[in-house]
Amino acid sequence: MPDILPGPWHLEFDTERDSYMVYDAPPNEDGEMFMAIAEVHVGERVSSVRHQRSHARLIAAAPELYAALQEAVRALNTAVRFKVGDTDSYAIAALCEQAIAKARKGDA
């Protein structure tokens, strides 16, 4: 895995910051949070609140999604090629590999 902190990450809403905060761990026994991974600010529009909450959940799920993509690539590349709709298992594995590469190196 690239320099991604292992999950699961924890999502909390911070009323003082009006933001969803993604942390590297749930709060400890004293209620203290650990390192912040991301902050997703909520706008004033209702649609913005719904979208920002969805974005924050996606960020919080990143470690598990990354690991699942890696497993999917291994499974798809070791199985006999099979048809999936208008495509096939190897093409889907290639799409997964592109997403993994983007997570490792970014768009550049």
Image: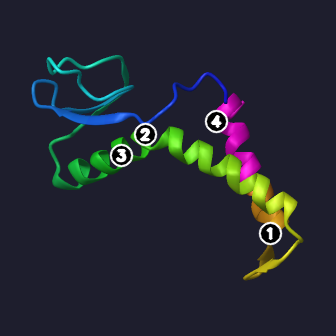
Q: Give the amino acid type for the residue marked by disc 3 in the picture.
A: Arg
Q: Give the amino acid type for the residue marked by disc 1 in the picture.
A: Ser
Identify the disc placed on residue 57.
3
Residue that mark 1 sits on:
89
Q: Are marks 3 and 2 in contact (CB under 8 Å)?
A: yes
Looking at marks 4 and 3 on the same chain, the residue that comes earlier in the sequence is marked by 3
Q: Give the amino acid type for the residue marked by disc 4 in the picture.
A: Ala
Instruction: Write the residue at 33% across / 34% down.
Output: 10
User: Where, quadrant-wise, is the N terminus in this rendering?
Assistant: top right
Is disc 1 surrounded by few (<14), some (14 to 19) or many (20+) residues within 10 Å? Answer: many
Closer to the eye: label 2 or 1:
1
**Highlighted magenta segment, given as a residue range:** 96-108
Q: Secondary structure at mark 1?
A: helix
Give yes or no for residue 13 being in the magenta stretch: no
Looking at marks 1 and 4 on the same chain, the residue that comes earlier in the sequence is marked by 1
Give yes or no for residue 107 being in the magenta stretch: yes
Query: Residue 59 or 108: which is nearer the viewer?
Result: 59
Looking at marks 2 and 1 on the same chain, the residue that comes earlier in the sequence is marked by 2
